[in-house]
Amino acid sequence: MFVQRGPRKGFTLIELLVVIAIIAILIALLVPAVQKVRAAAARTQCLNNLKQIGIALHSYHDAYKAFPVGQFNDDNRNWGWGTAILPFLDQGPIHDALSNDTVNFMMFPPGGGPNVWNGVSGYNADSNNTGGTVNLTAGGGAAGTVLRVYQCPANGWQAQTTSGFGKTNYLGNMGSDTSGGNWASWSNPNGGTMNGVLLQANNNTYSWAVKVAQITDGSSNTVAVGEVTHNSSGSGLYGANATNTFPIWAGGNPNNQGQGRQHNYFRLMDPAYPLNLRTTANADRCFGSDHEGGSHFLFCDGTVRFVSSTIDAVTYTALGTRAGDDAVTLPD
C-alpha cells in the first residue's frame, strides 16, 4: 500500500534570493549607524581627554601660579608641558620615573625663569646638543608609556613611535605666526615674543610661562591645547603611515632636533595654517582631527569646544592669541 504524502515544505530559489536581498539591505542600513555611534563615542572620549588635560593644567596653575612652560630650550634634549602636568593626571609615578630614564635632560623651574640642566655641574648652556641619552629599551621606558589621555581614539596612527616614545594627538598653542606667514624665516621668536599660551623657549638659558592674568583676551576666548592628526601624504613626519618620530607627549626635543621642529610639540593658529589643512608642508603646523567637520580645542578656562573647519581666519587667529584685545564669540 502506498501512502500519499503532501507537498514538501521549503524555500524556493526566488524566496531565498528575496531573503538575502532583505538581509543585505538591513546590513547596508546598519553599518552607517554603527559608524556614527563609533564616531560619536570617539568624539566623547576625545572631549573627555581634553577636559582632563584642562583640569591638570589648572591644577598646575593653582600649585605654581602659572601654566607650564611649553618647551624649555630649543636645542638640547628636554621634556615639555605634557610631562609637567603628569602628577595632576594621576600619573605621578611616570613623572618621577622620567628622571631615571634620562641623563642630562634640561629641566626648568615652575613658572619659568632660568633653565636648569638637571643638576649637572659645569653645564655650558650655550653648548648645544651635548650629551644625554634616552632609555628606550624594554618598551621605551617611562617616556614610551602609552597614555590614552593623550590619544584621540578617532586617529589612526600608531600609539608609539618606532623609537619607543608614546605619541599624542594634543599639542600646545604657540599663537599666531608673528613673521606674517613665513614659518621658515621665523628663527628668532622665543617665549617672550610668542602670543599663545604654551610657549617654546627658543633660548638656552631662560624659559617663559603664561599666567591667567596675562590672558587679557579672556580665558574663555583663548586656546591652550588643540587636536592634531596626520596630513594627506601618507608619509613624512605626520603622514598617515608615519610612526618614527613625532608628535610625542613627553617633550618637544628628545633627539636634539632643535628650532626647526617646533611643530613636533606645538601648532599655530594663523591664516597661513588653517584648521584641518592636510596638504603642503604647512599641514605639519596646523591643528586638525579625524572627527567630521572640525576639531576639539581646550580653552584656557578649562572648557572644551568643537570648532568647525569652516571658521573664518580672523576669528581663528583671535582664538590663538592671548593678548590682542580680540574677544570673539563662537557659534554654539
Image (spheres, rainbow, N blue to C red):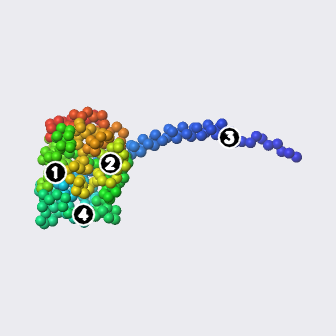
Identify the residue at horizontal 21%, vertical 42% (top origin).
183
Category of crowding for the residue at label 1, using alpha-carbon neighbours closer than 10 angstroms: few (below 14), some (14–19), many (at least 20): many
Please indicate, yes or no, whether residue 319 appears anywhere in the rendered image.
no
Disc 4 from disc 3: Cα separation = 72 Å
Identify the residue at horizontal 24%, vertical 38% (top origin).
272
Identify the residue at horizontal 30%, vertical 40% (top origin).
280
> As displayed, is residue 212 above or below residue 316?
below
The residue tagged with tag 2: helix, strand or loop? loop
Q: Which mark is residue 284?
A: none
Q: Earlier in the sequence, mark 2 or mark 4?
A: 4
Q: Earlier in the sequence, mark 1 or mark 4?
A: 4
Q: Classify residue 157 as left or right of residue 61.
A: right
Disc 1 from disc 3: Cα separation = 76 Å
Q: Classify residue 206 as left or right of residue 240.
A: left
The residue tagged with tag 1: helix, strand or loop? loop
Marks 1/4 in contact by CB < 8 Å: the verdict is: no
Residue type at the position of mark 2:
Gly
x and y percentages locating residue 195 in the rendered image: 16, 43
Residue type at the position of mark 4:
Thr
- Residue, disc 1: 202
Please indicate, yes or no, whether residue 2 appears anywhere in the rendered image.
yes
Disc 2 from disc 4: Cα separation = 25 Å
Say which of marks 3 and 2 sits in front: 2
Q: Which mark is residue 11?
A: 3
- Residue, disc 4: 133
Residue type at the position of mark 3:
Phe
Along the line of sight, the residue nearer the viewer: 30 or 230: 230
Along the line of sight, the residue nearer the viewer: 85 or 242: 242
Disc 2 from disc 1: Cα separation = 24 Å
Identify the residue at horizontal 36%, vertical 46% (top origin).
234
Disc 1 from disc 4: Cα separation = 21 Å
* Quadrant of the rendered image containing residue 277: top left
